[in-house]
């Protein structure tokens, strides 16, 4: 199974809220903004989409709205991962009829399963769909790292085609790249490591920072692929202040603040326990956007 559709820069879109409810109008504007800006694909209901505080019906509705608004222009990969294998399978089954190019499935969080349990979880989830599945490893949030040997084992499952690697461990990433086939798609889940991972043979990234200037992040990836390392390095350092400010306070608070400042969404409201950025952080975000000549 080819993983070419997962190369580039995918944006795990925020979920806009208005007075506690999903703001579908803002969500549709956001989708258009990201596609017009050069995003390779959209990922609704990931970590950045506040999936942890969406009800199942809201979760499905957000995916439906994104698919409808994208209208086939770029791939849509639905975030469906939970800490319950049955629940994850249930979400897959509810959205299987939509025009999706695959699923992003996070390592089960809180439960702290063994590596064998992680393998059985992904085997069960990938077994209920013919669509490609991306494994999502983010141990700082889940409490469990997906070990390199486990990733290698998962890569042998026909429709598990890649990984969003947010381990933050470049040695682990190098081992995954060395021990999996060339068509196993390794995407950076740590925005500041996009340049490094692409230089090592990675295929791009899934990045909250790419809400702003997705096309420039993609240009960085393309420059590496074309052998223009000087150009890619310049883009890396040009975009690094944006990456840093996007994680100054808990994600996705800064991303929502940036989209509000750019007029893409109407409100930067979040659901508790997350809160909007502080006044100082908002000022810093505005400064970075001004420096990029966006406001």
Image: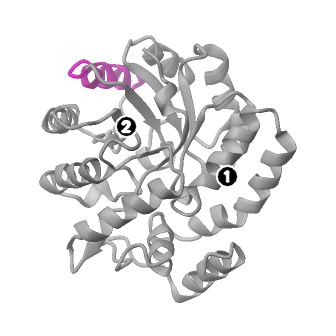
Callout 2 crowding tier (Cα within 10 Å): few <14, some 14–19, many ≥20: many
- In the image, residue 193 sits, relative to residue 127, either above or below, namely below
Q: Which residue is drawn at 73% across and 30% down?
A: 200
What is the number of the mark on residue 10? none
The quarter of the rendered structure image containing the C terminus is bottom right
Point 41% across, 42% down: residue? 74
- Residue 99, above or below 23: above
- The residue positioned 36% from the left and 25% from the top of the image is 132
Residue 4 visible, this angle? yes
What kind of element bears circle 2?
Answer: strand
Q: Residue 104 carries which label?
A: 2
Q: Check the image and report above or below for 26 versus 80.
A: below
Residue 2 pos. (x, y %): 46, 18
Residue tagged by mark 1?
192
Magenta stretch: residue 243 in it? no
| Span shown in magenta | 114-129
The image quadrant where one finds the N terminus is top left
């Amino acid at each position: 199974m080819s993983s070419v559709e997962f190369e580039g820069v995918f944006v795990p879109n925020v979920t806009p809220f208005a007075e506690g409810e999903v703001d579908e109008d803002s969500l549709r504007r956001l989708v258009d903004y990201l596609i017009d800006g050069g995003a390779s694909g959209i990922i609704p209901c990931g970590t950045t989409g506040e999936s942890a505080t969406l009800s199942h019906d809201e979760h499905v509705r957000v995916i439906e709205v994104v698919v409808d608004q994208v209208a086939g222009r770029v791939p849509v990969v639905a975030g469906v991962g939970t800490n319950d294998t049955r629940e994850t399978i249930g979400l897959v089954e509810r959205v299987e009829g939509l025009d999706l190019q695959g699923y992003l499935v996070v390592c089960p969080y809180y439960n702290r399963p063994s590596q064998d349990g992680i393998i059985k979880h992904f085997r069960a989830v990938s077994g209920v769909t013919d669509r490609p599945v991306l494994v999502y490893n983010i141990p700082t949030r889940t409490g469990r790292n997906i070990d390199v040997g486990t990733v290698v084992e998962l890569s042998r499952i026909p429709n598990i085609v890649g990984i969003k690697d947010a381990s933050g461990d470049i040695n682990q990433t190098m081992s995954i790249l060395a021990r999996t086939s060339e068509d196993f798609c390794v995407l950076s889940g740590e925005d500041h490591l996009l340049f490094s991972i692409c230089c090592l043979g990675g295929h791009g990234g899934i990045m909250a920072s790419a809400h702003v200037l997705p096309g420039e992040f993609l240009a960085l990836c393309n420059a590496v692929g074309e052998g223009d390392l000087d150009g890619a390095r310049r883009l890396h350092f040009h975009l690094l202040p944006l990456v840093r400010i996007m994680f100054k306070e808990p994600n996705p608070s800064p991303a929502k603040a940036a989209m509000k400042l750019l007029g893409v969404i109407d409100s930067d409201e979040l659901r508790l326990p997350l809160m909007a950025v502080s006044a100082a952080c908002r000022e810093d975000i505005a400064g970075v956007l001004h420096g990029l000549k966006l406001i």
